[in-house]
Amino acid sequence: MDDERLVYSLDKAFTYVGFGKFQVVVLLYAGLGLFAEAMEVMILSFIGPAIKSEWRISPAQESLLTTVVFAGLLLGTYSWGFISDNYSIRQAFLPASFG
């Protein structure tokens, strides 16, 4: 018996799987997440100068605040991915729904 595997090109795989309601919902949720991330970056550009004048911090401290936000995104993304891969997506994100 030969170990025969079906090999699909990307176009054939999309045609085989189809594009239905589930894919639309996934794209909408992914788009909302991308929108939220873009808004966070934009808001940082407005909040930075306001915090600088309100708290009287140096430009270096102002940029450190933005750096900490991106470091948190990096660590959070890596952590949630590790937890999801090793345990399950449900266990990783279920506690977040009760927050």
Image (cartoon, grey):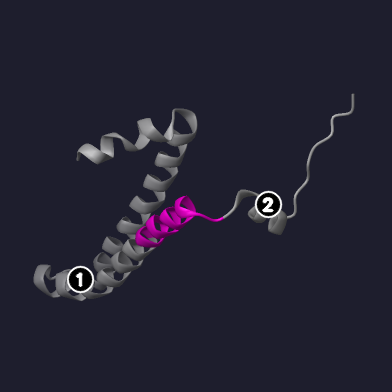
The extreme left residue here reads 54
Q: Main secondary structure of the magenta part?
A: helix
The extreme top residue here reads 1
Q: Report the front residue among 15 and 31.
A: 15
Quarter of the image for the N terminus: give it: top right
> Position of 33 compared to 44: left or right?
right
* Between marks 1 and 2 in the image, the one whose residue lies nearer the viewer: 2
Quarter of the image for the C terminus: give it: top left
Query: Residue 78 placed where, x, y %?
Result: 44, 44
Task: Give the label on residue 47, or none.
Answer: 1
Q: Earlier in the sequence, mark 1 or mark 2?
A: 2
Q: Where are the magenta residues, as a range?
A: 19-33
Instruction: Identify which residue is drawn at 40% across, 40% down.
Output: 80
Task: Give the label on residue 13, or none.
Answer: 2
Query: Residue 49 placed where, x, y %?
Result: 20, 76
> Position of 81 compared to 68: left or right?
right
Q: In the displayed structure, would residue 90 be above or below residue 8?
A: above
The amino acid type, in three-letter code, at marker 1 is Ile
Query: Residue 76 placed where, x, y %?
Result: 37, 46
Instruction: Identify which residue is drawn at 49% across, 34% down.
Output: 85
Q: Residues within 10 Å of mark 2 (few under 14, many from 20)?
A: few
Q: CA gap, disc 1 to disc 2?
A: 45 Å
Q: Report the front residue among 51 and 95.
A: 95
Element on which disc 1 rests: helix
